[in-house]
Amino acid sequence: MNTKYIFVTGGVVSSLGKGIISSSLACLLKARGFRVTIQKFDPYINIDPGTLNPYEHGECYVTVDGHEADLDLGHYERFTNVRTTRANNITTGRVYQNVIDKERRGDYLGKTVQIIPHITDEIKRNVKLLGKTGDYDFVITEIGGVVGDIESLPFLEAVRQLRWELGSDACCVHLTYVPFLGAAKELKTKPTQHSVKQLQQLGIQPDVLVLRTEHDIPREMRAKIAQFCNVAADAVVQSADAPTIYEVPMRMHRQHLDDIVLRICAVTPEREPDLKAWHTFLEKLQSPKDEVRIALVGKYVELQDAYKSINESLFIAATYNDRRLKLTSVHSEKLNDANAGELLVEMDGVIVAPGFGTRGIDGKFAALKWCREHDVPTFGICLGMQCMVIEFARNVMGLTNAHSREMDSMTPNPVIDLMDEQKSVTALGGTMRLGAYDCLLAEGSLARKAYGGAEKVSERHRHRFEFNSNYREAFEAAGMRCSGENPETRLVEIVEVPGKRWFLGTQFHPEYSSTVVAPSPIFLDFIKAAIDYRESKK
Ligand code: GLN
């Protein structure tokens, strides 16, 4: 079968959940035995989101091959359990950079380089790149932004051309919004009609419409939309607010979204989707035995997308442990030694978040001190792990002025220091230690137990600073064990305090590799420890 290309566009407003719809469709196709991947095209000019702060863009996700990517790639992986790479996330900046590099090389010698055809051709080349590997039956391409945005135009022009060239090897899915006007007590279809008109003006006829709504859209109303928009009546499906995003694949399947897409792509499916693992997960989700209370300590906790992968990993791990996750965000800037107990005493487990820079750092130390002294299950991730090391140096080893050189370049005890490979780095984009690295787990350690006895794991990184190995012996002598290290460089990747219930920090980000059907073992073990602690308090 030829590779099929599915394009997902959005209209009316942003934040409708194109990523979740793309992921749900991919999940259903994969469950039918097809090989599927999803890519995201972002219309902004940054080369990647690595230099954007969470206020601008939510979490920065990291792929195994070390690309700093849009957080939707996290949904893609969690829903499909298929790894993404740098080829799965392309920005306008990268498209232009490639074209300009070619121009400088002389590839277009004698020609005027223009948006059409050169930029659109480069977009088309990137759309087809994953298809050409021969690894996928379906390549789903999500176009960021909203139809009508000036910056999305070249992407939509590329979709128009591809739709024409690919015929039944392509399918266009358009996601719009159907608002409910409270005063009139009515659902309104006009914005959807306008959005589809806008798309048609650009030469794209959607094959499928997915309508985001807070209320059930009656069948007659969907039929009316189908008629106005030249779409088959059964190809207008609704996506009503769901209690959890993980229900969306089932909801889409019940409305035959996967069947409709297969029909449009002229593919006869061999079987119905096998969704056993998802059903098991959803059943567990619906019948938790109890709750588990986890605090997330960070400086961006007021932003719902800043720690997306951590939140989802905790949610998935709690669900597998038959618990309802009660996640409390604790702002690190508001935490100190005086109030840490009050803010954390109700918790069964505490996570200290990744991050950069000085803001909120003392609150992280205060939380870690309190948790260590009160033996609360505690998980430090990246900067959280580095803070664990610093707090231990200061309060257990008596190195009161210990710090990371990131926050205090003159500290006499840089227990966290810039990695050697980073010392010559001047540019900030894409230059951190990024992507998956192996980590050896020490025998008899909590780390190895948490990973189910594995000797070696591979997890993703995003940092410039590291545990300073000159202090390794001193830490081990004082009771902090370096239980995970890189096999080649011997960089310390995991620290833990034996004798505590669960007190462990990872330099890497295990949250990036946790998926619905393959939850992260270390998150599962952390939640288990939190549950045991909760039981012990009863
Ligand atoms: N700022 C720290 C470093 O660069 C930690 C980074 C992170 O938490 N992702 O090493």
Image (cartoon, rainbow, N blue to C red):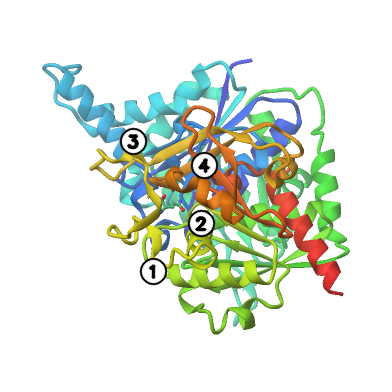
Give the residue type that dot 2 points to: Val
> For mark 1, what is the residue?
359
Q: Nearer the viewer, residue 503 or 393?
A: 393
Give the residue type that dot 4 points to: Val
> For mark 4, what is the residue?
492
Camera-side mark, 4 or 3: 4
> For mark 3, what is the residue?
421
Q: Nearer the viewer, residue 515 or 522?
A: 522
Above or below, 99 relative to 257: above
Whether disc 1's CB lies below 8 Å from ligand 1 is answered no
Q: CA distance from mark 4 to mark 3?
A: 15 Å
> For mark 2, what is the residue?
389
Q: Earlier in the sequence, mark 4 or mark 3?
A: 3
- Where is residue 406, by image quadrant? bottom left
How many marks the image carries: the answer is 4
Tell me residue 119's x, y (percent). 28, 31
Give the residue type that dot 1 points to: Arg
Tell me, yes or no, if residue 393 can be seen here.
yes
Tell me residue 166's x, y (percent). 50, 22
Q: Residue at x 46, y 23 (%)?
A: 128
Q: CA distance from mark 2 to mark 3?
A: 21 Å
Q: Residue at x 71, y 77 (%)?
A: 346
Q: Secondary structure at mark 2?
A: helix
- Where is residue 423, by image quadrant? top left
Q: Nearer the viewer, residue 242 or 468?
A: 468
Q: Residues within 10 Å of mark 4 (few under 14, many from 20)?
A: many
Q: Earlier in the sequence, mark 2 or mark 4?
A: 2
Camera-side mark, 1 or 3: 3
